[in-house]
Image (spheres, helix red, strand yellow):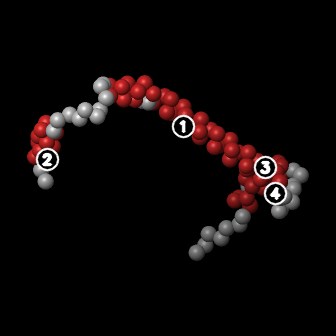
């Protein structure tokens, strides 16, 4: 159906129908005043609320993972020398012998 024709028909039907007496005086103005006063589109408030929710969820995840890492025992044993473990990790690729002949 043609949109322009549909719009023309809807406007004609709306003009032919009489306004109802059931609607209180200045009802639409009161509704619009309430909507603009309480639900104003404030982008900064939207972002602040969203970022605080994100921060709260990150703190909750941090606490859960901290408790989990504290109470779960280590399966590989505790090594006493962190510098030795770091050096082994950094030089792991160098220490491996590769056979590049194909």
Which is nearer the eye, 66 or 42? 42
Q: Decide if residue 4 is in sight here.
A: no
Circle 4 or circle 2, nearest the eye: 2
Distance from the alpha carbon under mark 4 to that under mark 3: 9 Å
Q: Position of residue 41 (x, y in %)?
A: 42, 30
Is residue 22 shown above or below 72?
above
Which label number is shown at residue 67? 3
Provide the secondary structure element on which disc 1 rests: helix
Q: Which residue is mark 2?
A: 6
The residue that appears at 83% across and 62% down in the rendered structure is: 75
Distance from the alpha carbon under mark 4 to that under mark 2: 68 Å
What is the quadrant of residue 59 in the picture? Answer: top right
Q: Residues within 10 Å of mark 2 (few under 14, many from 20)?
A: few
What is the quadrant of residue 31 in the picture? Answer: top left
Q: Position of residue 96 (x, y in %)?
A: 72, 64
Q: Which residue is mark 4?
A: 72
Provide the secondary structure element on which disc 4 rests: loop
91 horizontally vs 81: left or right: left
Which is nearer the eye, 82 or 43? 43
Numbered marks: total = 4
Q: Position of residue 92 (x, y in %)?
A: 73, 59
Q: Which residue is mark 1?
A: 50
Distance from the alpha carbon under mark 2 to that under mark 3: 64 Å
Mark 1 or mark 4: name the one nearer the start of the chain: 1
């Amino acid at each position: 159906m043609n949109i322009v024709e549909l719009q023309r028909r809807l406007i004609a039907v709306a003009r032919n129908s009489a306004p109802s007496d059931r609607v209180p005086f200045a009802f639409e103005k009161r509704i619009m005043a309430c909507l603009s006063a309480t639900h104003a589109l404030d982008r900064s408030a939207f972002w602040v609320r969203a970022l605080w929710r994100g921060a709260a969820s990150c703190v909750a995840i941090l606490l859960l993972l901290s408790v989990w890492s504290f109470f779960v025992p280590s399966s590989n044993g505790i090594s006493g020398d962190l510098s030795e473990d770091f050096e082994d990790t950094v030089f792991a690729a160098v220490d491996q012998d590769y056979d590049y002949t194909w």
